[in-house]
Image (cartoon, rainbow, N blue to C red):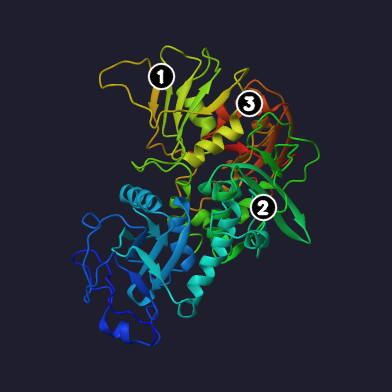
């Protein structure tokens, strides 16, 4: 018990339980053993009570109401986006922790951000406030696990941002991390697509490029962020996590590559900075019926307990990395600006149907004074990014459309009683949203626009000829057709991608009789 200093001023918020009981001080197994806290010159022998608002800013933060099974990594992930994390002390019996940041400024930014955006760890809201400790000193021997995790993070951080305290020999031991991650997926019982990876990893920063491949009978991917710091945060938070319940485990390392050279935009590789790249020929692909069959028990992207759910706090924090405003406003806009539209043909409904392939469009507004442009509000920033990466540069009604992120945060509805000629439509409560249901198989079937369409919900009495005639009437040529075994689904190939886009706009949700509404989406297969 040598080295225990009992003149510790430890902070808890008013009205909460006392952080440390006398038994905790005297317990030989306590994490507090050997802890020395420099408490701003205060020699008080008793525990002090503090409130975030009353307590002056400090680079030591006190985190409360943590879930029982929380790990050091998850607590560190809360602080990482805001700067260097220099120390951590876990009080697991009390569901609390202390986190020390490198600077007071970083701590102020973190507290301000989490005041506006409540942090969650494993879907549980946690509370963060300034401690009245100015410094946290822990006995490494008695706080080993937490220190080991912290050192691993610090080694990576020090490599990317050398500090004055880093010696040349230490820097040599840790090569600068790359913005490129190498991802291996173990226990791959469900298919993992390029778009699934983009959706998961984009929570930590801008994903620029992805290449997927199979090596040693394992699905692998190389994924490039725009910044090594984002790659580091994603690795810290996601390594060892499952994409779906109890399977598809992510194993993540830094790649030796610092830049990926992507030649084709298709289901195997994607350069989100160059939407004009060709799709390439002869790409092997998986039948969409196989992906659909995997829907059972899947819980994609942490939509249910047990699959990536611990990441909500880390994802929220990391999404703020590099763009944290003190007001708490952060993240990507969910509103898209679409321009170069065919103003004679386009309607809010046609835009809703097309953009609805990549997310749940909430509102669509064709601009009154510029009818070749429209604003589309998606459900979130990820869906907006997904729609932009897939639809920018595609042809709609004979014109190549341009899709960019808008500076607007929402699409305004017209004032009541004002006639805007039907240019604005609110789809918030539309029954046609494809992604409203958590873990929906539609998440697994997001593919770039292609000439081949996947049809489902086909009535039993509908023939191949019926469908060929129906799709020919949308103004295109049906090149090939194939029913699936049960005749409820089919693949239908149009002559061009533009014709397929037109057919999807015209015929998705088409009433085939007996209340059977045809469902149409792009396929990655060819017939």
Q: Is residue 265 visible?
A: yes
Taking 406 as reference, is 56 above or below it? below
Labels 2, 1: front one: 1
Labelled disc at residue 232:
none
For the point 74% across and 46% down, the residue is 285
Task: Give whichever of 184, 148 is nearer the camera.
Answer: 148
- Position of the C terminus, as image quadrant, is top right
Q: Is residue 343 left or right of residue 15?
A: right
Percent position (x, y) of residue 456?
59, 42
Quarter of the image for residue 271 reads top right
Q: Is residue 242 visible?
A: no
Tell me the residue that label 2 is attached to.
290
Percent position (x, y) of residue 151?
54, 66
Tell me the residue that label 1 is attached to.
423
Element class at badge 2: helix
Taking 370 as reference, is 253 above or below it? below
Tell me the residue that label 3 is attached to.
394
Task: Give whichever of 38, 489 is nearer the camera.
Answer: 38
From mark 2 to mark 1, how far is it between C-alphas? 40 Å
Q: Earlier in the sequence, mark 1 or mark 3?
A: 3
Percent position (x, y) of residue 35?
38, 76
């Amino acid at each position: 018990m040598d080295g225990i200093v009992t003149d510790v001023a430890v902070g808890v918020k008013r009205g909460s339980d006392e952080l440390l009981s006398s038994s905790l001080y005297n317990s030989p197994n306590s994490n507090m053993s050997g802890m020395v806290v420099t408490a701003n010159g205060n020699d008080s022998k008793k525990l002090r009570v503090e409130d975030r608002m009353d307590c002056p800013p400090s680079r030591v933060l006190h985190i409360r109401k943590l879930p029982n099974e929380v790990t050091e990594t998850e607590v560190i992930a809360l602080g990482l986006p805001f700067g260097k994390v220099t120390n951590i002390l876990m009080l697991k019996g009390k569901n609390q922790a202390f986190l020390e940041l490198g600077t007071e400024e970083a701590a102020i930014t973190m507290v301000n951000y989490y005041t506006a955006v409540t942090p969650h760890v494993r879907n549980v809201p946690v509370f963060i406030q300034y401690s009245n400790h100015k410094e946290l000193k822990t006995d490494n021997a008695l706080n080993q696990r937490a220190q080991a995790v912290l050192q691993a993070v610090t080694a990576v951080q020090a490599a990317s941002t050398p500090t004055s305290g880093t010696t040349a020999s230490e820097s040599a031991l840790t090569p600068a991390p790359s913005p490129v991650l190498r991802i291996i997926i173990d226990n791959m019982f469900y298919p993992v697509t390029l778009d699934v990876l983009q959706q998961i990893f984009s929570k930590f920063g801008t994903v620029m490029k992805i290449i997927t491949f199979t090596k040693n009978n394992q699905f692998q991917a190389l994924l490039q962020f725009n910044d090594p710091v984002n790659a580091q945060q994603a690795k810290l938070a996601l390594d060892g996590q499952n994409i779906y319940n109890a399977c598809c485990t992510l194993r993540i390392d830094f790649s030796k590559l610092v830049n990926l050279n992507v030649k084709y935009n298709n289901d195997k590789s994607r350069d989100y900075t160059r939407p004009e790249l060709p799709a390439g020929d002869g790409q092997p692909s998986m039948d969409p019926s196989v992906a659909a069959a995997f829907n059972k028990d899947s819980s994609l992207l942490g939509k249910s307990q047990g699959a990536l759910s611990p990441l909500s706090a880390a994802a929220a924090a990391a999404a703020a990395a590099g763009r944290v405003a003190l007001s708490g406003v952060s993240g990507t806009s969910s509103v898209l600006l679409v321009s170069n539209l065919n103003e004679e043909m386009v309607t809010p409904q046609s835009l809703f149907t097309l953009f609805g392939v990549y997310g749940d469009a909430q509102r669509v507004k064709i601009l009154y004074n510029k009818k070749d442009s429209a604003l589309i509000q998606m459900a979130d920033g990820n869906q907006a990014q997904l729609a932009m990466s897939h639809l920018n540069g595609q042809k709609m009604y004979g014109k190549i459309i341009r899709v960019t992120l808008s500076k607007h945060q929402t699409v305004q509805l017209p004032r009541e009683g004002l006639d805007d000629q039907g240019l604005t439509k609110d789809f918030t409560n539309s029954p046609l949203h494809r992604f409203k249901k958590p873990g929906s198989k539609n998440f697994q079937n997001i593919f770039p626009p292609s000439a081949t369409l996947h049809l489902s919900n086909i009535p039993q009495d509908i023939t191949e000829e019926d469908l060929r005639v129906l799709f020919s009437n949308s103004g295109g040529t049906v090149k090939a057709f194939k029913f699936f075994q049960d005749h409820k689904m089919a693949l239908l190939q149009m002559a061009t991608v533009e014709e397929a886009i037109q057919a999807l706009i015209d015929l998705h949700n088409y009433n085939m009789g007996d209340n059977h509404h045809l469902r149409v989406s792009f396929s990655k297969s060819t017939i």
